[in-house]
Image: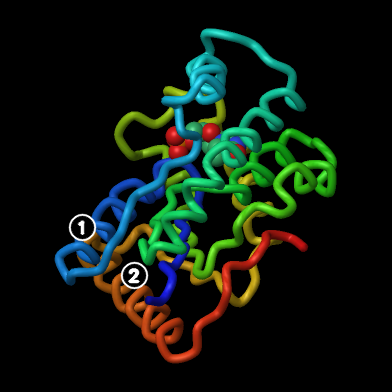
Amino acid sequence: MSRGLFILFEGCDRSGKTTQSTRLVQALKDMGIKAKLVKFPDRTTAIGKMIDGYLTQKSQLSDQAIHLLFSANRWEAMNQMRADLESGITLVVDRYAFSGVAFSAAKRLDFKWCKSPDVGLIAPDRVFFMDIHPDDAAKRDGYGEEIYEKREFQLDVRAKFFSMMDKSWAIIDAMKDVDLIHRQILLLTKKALQAQEAEPVPIAKLWT
Ligand code: FDM
């Protein structure tokens, strides 16, 4: 049995990552493919609860401390993610280490320092970058509720994402129709699954 794929959604706030990742999991399941949604930060764990307190501005933490908590929140999920991938489950992940680096580096923390705690995490096989200009994102429902939802900051975050892209990334125009985006992403995912079937690639490590 071949392993599952690690499909990642990244992007700025309110770009539709959650909508599209949820729809992708459902579509894969409908096709009989084992799939699971994973979301970072995972606010349900003890570390996740500390992150939630910070994001909703109930508690304060230094930039370095919150950065390391976000990373720890990924590391605590690694054993389960590896087990799932090895048992043939495709993981559809909503945000990951690229968000970690983009947001902290936009706060002017050193780029290399930001990457280091996430070195060695499981690497995604395919990344969908939901691209939206922060001015368009700001018009969407609920924008501005959390600490990072400010225009200049989001512009900087977007630039940081662009600086980390490689050939495993696809830039998705998040202003397009939701169904259209879904079909585009499903097609790209099917291609990735077929490629993995034809020529299996082992699970890789991030930034090594
Ligand atoms: N965020 C998310 C970070 O700053 N670092 C990280 O490592 C991750 C995973 O947390 F503003 C930020 C990005 C976003 C906020 O994310 C919460 P969601 O997707 O809105 O829950």
- Residue 151 visible at all: no
Picture quadrant where residue 201 is located: bottom right
Q: Which residue is mark 1?
A: 26
Q: Residues within 10 Å of mark 2 (few under 14, many from 20)?
A: some
Q: Please tell me which residue is depicted at 57% across the width and 34% down the height of the picture.
A: 73
Residue in front for this viewpoint, 46 or 191 = 46
Q: Earlier in the sequence, mark 1 or mark 2?
A: 1
Q: Which amino acid type corresponds to the residue marked 1 in the rendered image?
A: Gln
Q: Residue placed farthest to the bottom in the image? A: 198
Tell me if residue 158 can be seen.
yes
Closest to the camera, between mark 1 and mark 2, is 1
Label drawn at residue 55: none
Tell me, for residue 185, which label it has, or none: 2
Q: Residue furthest top?
A: 58
**Residue drawn at 77 percent across, 27 percent down:** 64
Instruction: Tell me if residue 27 comes above or below residue 114 in the rendering.
Output: below
Dot 2 beta carbon under 8 Å from ligand 1: no
The N terminus appears in which quarter of the rendering?
bottom left
Identify the residue at image location x=35%, y=58%. Answer: 175
Q: In the rendered structure, are the residues bearing label 1 and label 2 in contact, judged by CB atoms less than 8 Å apart?
A: no
In front of the other: 168 or 16:
168
Query: For the residues marked 1 and 2, what is the alpha-carbon distance in whole angstroms?
Result: 13 Å
Label 2, secondary structure: give it: helix
Residue 194, image x and y in percent?
37, 85
User: Residue 159 placed where, x, y %?
Assistant: 66, 54
Circle 2: residue type = Ile
